[in-house]
């Protein structure tokens, strides 16, 4: 429960080869928020359809960096993530970005950003 976040690991609840539909449905049924590093999920029809069908709330952590660094930036962005979750009804997929190098130079604790990825915003 560090940083006020409760984290459940996939491997503690599902076998490694569990079909995406199975674990995505279970996450939604428990009211959890799914977190993944798979930025291609929106383009995988079976996974995207499972998100929609089961009304999943899915955060995609974006970036090529060591996982401890990604986790540190995720925690720094937690307040923005909470605000995003409160403002959006399921189903959705959102991207969580690290702060830019410029932002980190000004403030090493700078939060990243959260943007809606699916469903696309209507214009």
Image (tube, rainbow, N blue to C red):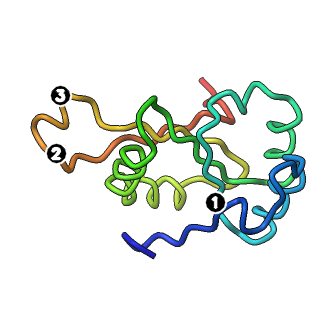
- For residue 55, side relative to residue 3 (left or right): right
In which quarter of the view is residue 4 placed? bottom left
Label 1 sits on residue:
33
Res. 53 visible in picture: no
Q: What's the CA distance linking mark 1 and mark 2? A: 27 Å
Q: Which residue is mark 3?
A: 102
Q: Residues within 10 Å of mark 3 (few under 14, many from 20)?
A: few
Label 2 close to label 3 by CB (< 8 Å): no
Which one is earlier in the sequence, the residue at label 2 or at label 3? 3
Mark 2 vs mark 3, CA separation in Å: 10 Å
**Foreground: disc 1 or disc 2:** 2
Rendering quarter of residue 70: top left
Q: Looking at the picture, does residue 116 appear above or below residue 15?
A: above
Name above or below for residue 88 compared with residue 64. below
What residue lies at 71% left-to-right and 69% top-to-bottom? 31
Q: Is residue 113 visible?
A: yes
Residue, x 40% and y 49% (percent of image)? Answer: 68
- Element on which disc 2 rests: loop
Residue assigned mark 2? 108
Query: CB atoms at circles 3 and 1 under 8 Å apart?
Result: no
Q: Earlier in the sequence, mark 1 or mark 2?
A: 1
Neighbourhood count class around disc 1 (C-alpha, 10 Å): few under 14, some 14–19, many 20 upward: some
Name the spot of residue 122 as percent of width and height, x first.
63, 28
Residue 98, disc: none
Is 81 situated above or below 70? below
Circle 1: element type: loop
Q: Nearer the viewer, residue 14 or 22?
A: 14
Cβ atoms at labels 1 and 2 below 8 Å apart: no
Instruction: Sort mark 2 into few (<14), some (14-19) or many (20+) by Cα contacts within 10 Å.
Output: few
Farthest residue, direction left: 106
Whole-percent x, y for residue 110 in the image: 22, 46
């Amino acid at each position: 429960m560090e940083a006020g976040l409760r984290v459940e690991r996939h491997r503690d609840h599902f076998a490694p080869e569990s079909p995406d539909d199975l674990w995505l449905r279970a996450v939604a049924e428990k009211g959890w928020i799914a977190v993944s590093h798979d930025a291609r999920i929106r383009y995988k029809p079976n996974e995207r359809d499972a998100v929609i069908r089961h009304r999943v709330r899915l955060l995609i952590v974006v970036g090529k960096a060591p996982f401890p660094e990604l986790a540190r930036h995720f925690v720094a962005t937690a307040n923005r993530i909470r605000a995003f979750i409160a403002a959006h009804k399921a189903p959705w997929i959102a991207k969580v970005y690290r702060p830019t190098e410029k932002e980190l130079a000004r403030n090493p604790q700078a939060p990243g950003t959260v943007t809606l990825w699916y469903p696309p915003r209507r214009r």
